[in-house]
Amino acid sequence: MQVFVIAMVVLVLFGTLIDVIHKRSAKYFFQHRQVVRSRATRRVGGGELVAAAAETIVVTGLAAGEFCNPWRRISHLLLMYGFLLYVLTTAVLVFAYPTAASPAPAIVPELWHLGALLVCLGGYWFWLLLRVDVAAEGHSRFALVRADMFIVSLLASATSALVWSGFQTAGNALWAGVFFALYILASTVLFGSVPWSKFAHMFYKPAAAFQRRIEQANGYRRNLPAPADRPATFGSARRAPHHY
């Protein structure tokens, strides 16, 4: 299991690197940063950089402030904190308490179960009720696209982990072995599919949010059209839509 966990970490690092190279995300980010610096109207001080970083961590990272829909935000927070708890306690159990001769404190496996349950709660809530194409467009809840690979494999990993734990506690070795194999398979897909899923997205979002705050602080203005709730700078003012 220690070798397996290390292999999953390597897959995530390698997959993220492939994703960055393939999508040229880093190249675009640094090019845009140079444009922002050249068009800035003021220099951002060290204190403002620290404040922007802290705001990014708290608002975007810890509170998921980019979500306007409160239910989507709650679902995301359940998934995020559940996933972190699930992964961290797995690492603690595998590396700090690898054998039956050194049993883990009772709180550690309880937190592992709690993390998996939070993942299932937030994930199934999102999958069944909150996805835009399902909730607004009436598509089938079971229609899969490549972008769904992350959430599906994460749910499969957490669900099979909980079922495996249940059968193991009940002493059913056969079904415990079956669901342990499914758990390993789902986890391998989760961490091995980074270049094709949205896994790497979690690394980009904080950097993009921090960059937006720097742009607001240094006076850079994006070339975007006027907001819909204001009259445009040319032509007549907006009018309420007519329904014929």
Image (cartoon, rainbow, N blue to C red):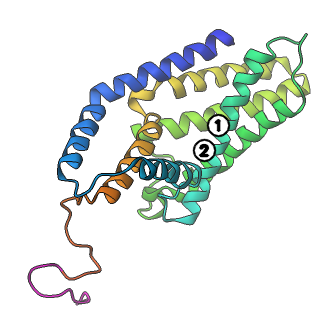
Q: Residue at x 84, y 36 (%)?
A: 110
Tally of marks: 2
Q: What label sits on residue 80 in the rendered view?
A: 2
Q: Is residue 53 above or below residue 87?
A: below
CA gap, disc 2 and disc 1: 6 Å
Query: Would you identify the image quadrant in which residue 107 lies?
Result: top right
Q: Is residue 80 above or below residue 169?
A: below
The residue carrying mark 1 is 84
The majority secondary structure of the magenta stretch comes to loop
Labelled pair 2, 1 in contact (Cβ < 8 Å) = yes
Most foreground residue, 24 or 217 = 217
Q: Residue at x 48, y 65 (%)?
A: 68
Quadrant where the N terminus sits is top right
Q: Position of residue 119 (x, y in %)?
A: 66, 43
Which portion, as a residue range, is magenta? 232-244
Q: Residue at x 61, y 46 (%)?
A: 79
Whether residue 233 is in magenta: the answer is: yes
Most foreground residue, 27 or 45 = 45
